[in-house]
Image: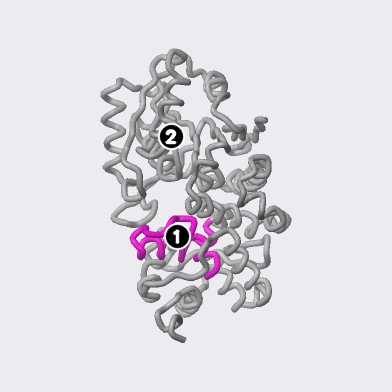
């Protein structure tokens, strides 16, 4: 059963999020956007292409002016300006103009790259998000943030570009390997922690069904998770204020991700960053000790890490201070005032950050203790 959630931009309808369990209704949605006379380019990575690339191309051929596919090598290491450059070259060779459209088929890397290409090619063309990972469905496909990594720094180059549609086929979550699936769950948990304590409790109550990937439960989970992000994005579409709350867990998380050379998945690093941020919240007496340990331990049943080895805490601190979230020399840190309510703080000290990193650092000394 398909369900629809409208997203507003500057208080006006901007695009819909469609929740469904197949690709069957995709052309109907594209047809409603006037795609009969458009050239459509599916942008996807090599792994997703093997699963769904030909299926989607087959759905489009003969229905629009032209349907083509551009495939780039999968992996975070390819989230670069060079990959965007290759998309530009392909679109020019295929004769694309401003009236045409890109379709981002894949995870967060694909969505971010495609969105940035759409924002900048010919000064902007339309694009549609078709996210195929839990991480992309619950987070990166919604809200119009696009971009690429630069010299190893996450999303350092980018633009705000709203999609025309977000089409979520939840059936694709069944094809995700286990580690990737649960890595995406970190963003779902984040939405409950920062804005919706009732949703957070619902996640715990439905733990078994979520782990078993019950599609009906996943559809309700995604609608509730996306509602949190939708409301935040509608209130602050270009991150001038409250949208920064969505960065809970990301400040230290991004630093760990870079320090580990992307060996860990983004969602795994967000989970580690969330534990660190909750630790600072406890030490500032915003959370009780019991609340901190509950937040920390609830990542475990969803196969997410709460400690990390082979890192240098001083290096992690240095990397947090080179993050794009720095403002006038201060880090915009997201803390928990309580479960279900996050706050922005610009006064977190180096000592507090180091203590939080030490809390999640699993060293050789710990093994032999």
User: In x, y percent, where is residue 179?
Assistant: 48, 54
Whether residue 215 appears in this view of the structure is yes
Q: Main secondary structure of the magenta part?
A: helix
| Residue at the (49%, 79%) spot, across then down | 355
Residues at marks 2 and 1, CA–CA distance in whole angstroms? 36 Å
- Total marks drawn? 2
Does 318 sit left or right of 92 as displayed?
right
Q: Magenta includes 343?
A: no
10 Å neighbourhood of mark 2: few (<14), some, or many (≥20)? few
Q: Whole-percent x and y of residue 289?
A: 66, 77
Q: Residue 351, which numbered label?
A: none
- Quadrant of the snapshot with the N terminus: top right
Which of the two residues, 288 or 147, is positioned nearer the viewer here? 288
Which image quadrant for residue 335? Answer: bottom right
Q: Nearer the viewer, mark 2 or mark 1?
A: 2
Q: Is residue 210 left or right of residue 54?
A: right
Label 2: which secondary element:
helix
> Are there few (<14), some (14-19), or many (20+) residues within 10 Å of tag 1?
some
On screen, residue 93 above or below 336 = above
Q: Are the two marked residues, 2 and 1, in contact with CB atoms closer than 8 angstroms?
A: no
Residue at mark 1: 325
Q: Secondary structure at mark 1?
A: loop
Q: Which residues are magenta?
A: 247-276
Was residue 274 drawn as part of the magenta stretch in this picture? Answer: yes
User: Where residue 285 appears, x then y in whole percent?
Assistant: 65, 77
Q: Which residue bears the numbered disc 2?
A: 51
Q: Is residue 221 left or right of residue 42?
A: right
Residue closest to the eye, 222 or 121: 222
- Measuring from the top left, give residue 28's x and y in whole percent: 57, 20
């Amino acid at each position: 059963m398909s369900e629809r959630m409208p997203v507003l931009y500057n208080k006006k309808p901007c695009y819909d999020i469609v929740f469904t369990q197949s690709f069957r209704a995709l052309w109907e949605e594209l047809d409603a956007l006037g795609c009969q006379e458009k050239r459509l380019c599916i942008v996807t990575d090599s792994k997703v292409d093997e699963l769904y690339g030909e299926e989607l191309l087959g759905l489009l051929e003969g229905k629009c002016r032209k349907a083509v596919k551009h495939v780039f090598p999968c992996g975070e290491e390819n989230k670069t300006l060079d990959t965007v450059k290759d998309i530009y070259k392909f679109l020019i060779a295929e004769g694309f103009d401003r009236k045409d459209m890109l379709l981002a088929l894949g995870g967060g890397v694909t969505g971010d790259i495609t969105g940035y290409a759409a924002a900048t090619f010919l000064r902007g063309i339309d694009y549609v998000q078709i996210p195929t990972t839990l991480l992309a469905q619950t987070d990166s496909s919604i809200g119009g943030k696009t971009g690429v990594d630069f010299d190893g720094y996450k999303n350092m180059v980018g633009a705000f570009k709203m999609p025309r549609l977000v089409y979520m086929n939840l059936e694709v979550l069944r094809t995700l390997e286990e580690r990737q699936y649960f890595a995406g769950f970190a963003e779902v948990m984040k939405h409950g922690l920062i804005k919706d304590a009732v949703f957070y409790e619902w996640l715990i109550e439905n733990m078994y069904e979520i782990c078993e990937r019950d599609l009906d439960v996943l559809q309700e989970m995604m609608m509730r998770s996306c509602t949190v992000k939708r409301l935040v994005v509608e209130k602050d579409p270009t991150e001038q204020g409250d949208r920064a709350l969505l960065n809970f867990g990301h400040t230290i998380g991004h630093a760990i991700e870079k320090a580990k050379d992307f060996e860990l998945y983004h969602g795994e690093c967000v989970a580690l960053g969330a534990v660190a941020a909750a630790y600072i919240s406890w030490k500032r007496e915003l959370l009780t000790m019991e609340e901190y340990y509950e937040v920390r331990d609830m990542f475990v049943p969803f196969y997410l890490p709460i400690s990390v080895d082979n890192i240098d805490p001083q290096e992690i601190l240095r990397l947090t201070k080179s993050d794009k979230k720095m403002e006038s020399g201060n880090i915009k840190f997201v803390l928990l005032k309580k479960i279900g309510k996050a706050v922005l703080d610009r006064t977190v000290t180096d000592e507090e950050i180091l203590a939080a990193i030490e809390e999640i650092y699993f060293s050789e000394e710990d093994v032999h203790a």
